[in-house]
Amino acid sequence: MGRDVFYITTPIYYPNDVPHIGHAYDAVAADVIARHHRLRGEEVFHLTGTDEHGLNIQRKATAAGVEPQTWVDDMEPKWREVWQRLDIAYDDYIRTTELRHKESVVKLLDQVRRNGRDDIYLDTYEGLYCVSCELYYAEGDLLEGGLCPIHERP
């Protein structure tokens, strides 16, 4: 695939639960755009998949009494089933727990390091984290009592 390929990707979804209408919206929108470009005779690469890491997944797995990998292995096929039922025509589906993904990340990081760039570095970040938003907030951004401005809870 070269420069003349139209690349489109969905978010990589967190399989901490089954897909909902918001996930379907993103997937259908990307599929419509990909199909439009294909109908115009363009080469298209449509990517989707699941991001199988994070605190939300760990919490769901713990609550279910299973390991996080077991949780995502059980949950992930439900995502593919929904995309199949919606007739989503992606070209590739990636799971961040797949070996090919891990190898690609290592290769990318090695290339960045070899280039002598300091784009990626180890450091410490302090902040207040909202698990649901998956964001850090400064104290000044929180509601009274230290609550998340979106979810109104700690």
Image: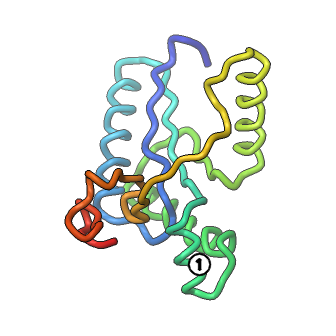
Name the spot of residue 122 as percent of width and height, x first: 67, 39
60 versus 57 height, above or below = below
Q: Which residue is drawn at 73% across and 36% down?
A: 104
82 versus 51 height, above or below = below
Q: Image quarter for residue 106?
A: top right
Q: Choose between 57 and 20: the one closer to the eye.
A: 57
Split into 4 quadrants, where in the image is the C terminus? bottom left
Q: Helix, strand or loop at disc 1?
A: helix
Is 17 displayed left or right of 29 in the figure?
right
Q: Which residue is drawn at 36% across and 39% down?
A: 30
Q: What residue type is labelled 1?
A: Ala
Name the spot of residue 109 as percent of width and height, x first: 72, 31
Q: Which residue is drawn at 69% across and 77% down?
A: 67
Q: Image quarter for residue 112?
A: top right
Q: Choose between 48 and 101: the one closer to the eye.
A: 101
* Residue linked to disc 1: 61
Q: Choose between 109 and 136: the one closer to the eye.
A: 136
Q: Choose between 128 and 119: the one closer to the eye.
A: 128
Q: Image quarter for residue 119?
A: top right
Is 96 displayed left or right of 44 in the figure?
right
Name the spot of residue 139 as percent of width and height, x first: 32, 55
Q: Residue at x 64, y 51 (%)?
A: 96
Split into 4 quadrants, where in the image is the N terminus? top right
* Display coloring: rainbow
